[in-house]
């Protein structure tokens, strides 16, 4: 199911994403998408978080540079993407972590 894309929904989402804990959970759900992950949705989610968190952490000029950095980062391949994304998130006050997956019992 796709979420509505009206301006009011976007404004609501950005207001929620200003909470770093909510932003982290929002990104976590996108990273954990196992069935048919869509790189475009992840990019959109990262841009949403940037829009929300940059208002309190970055100047408008820094936010624009950060958006450009994300574009460049997502066009790369290999392990540089992971390290770059970790640094990119750190500049927004978030961190990329690895956790033990829950065992699924059949």
Image: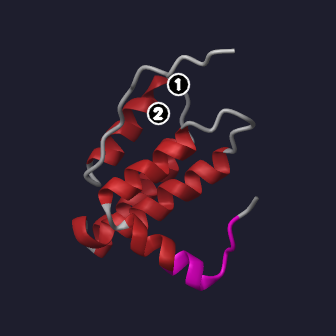
Q: Quadrant of residue 51?
A: bottom left
Circle 2 — which element?
A: helix
> Is residue 4 shown in magenta?
yes
- Name the residue rendered at 62%, 38% in the picture: 33
Question: How far separated are the C-alphas under marks 1 and 2?
Answer: 6 Å
Residue 48: x and y in percent read: 48, 64
- Name the residue rendered at 34%, 67% in the picture: 18
Q: Are marks 1 and 2 in contact (CB under 8 Å)?
A: yes
- Decide: few, some or many residues near mark 1? Use Cα within 10 Å; few <14, some 14-19, many ≥20: few
Q: Nearer the viewer, residue 31 or 85?
A: 31
* Residue that carries the numbered disc 1 in the rendered image: 78
* Residue that carries the numbered disc 2 in the rendered image: 81
In this picture, residue 100 sits left or right of residue 6: left
Whether residue 53 appears in this view of the structure is: yes
In this rendering, the answer to whether 58 lies above or below 87 is below
Quadrant in which the C terminus appears: top right
In this picture, residue 51 sits left or right of residue 103: left
Residue 11: x and y in percent read: 50, 80
Please report the bounds of the magenta region as a residue range: 3-11
């Amino acid at each position: 199911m796709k979420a509505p894309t009206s301006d009011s929904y976007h404004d609501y989402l950005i207001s929620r994403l200003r909470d770093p804990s909510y932003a982290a959970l929002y990104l976590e759900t996108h990273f954990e998408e196992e069935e048919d992950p869509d790189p475009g949705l992840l990019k959109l989610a990262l841009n949403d978080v940037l829009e929300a968190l940059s208002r309190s952490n970055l100047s408008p000029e820094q936010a624009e540079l950060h958006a450009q950095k994300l574009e460049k980062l997502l066009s790369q391949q290999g392990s540089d993407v992971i390290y770059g994304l970790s640094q990119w998130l750190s500049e927004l006050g978030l961190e990329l972590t690895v956790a033990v997956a829950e065992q699924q019992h059949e």
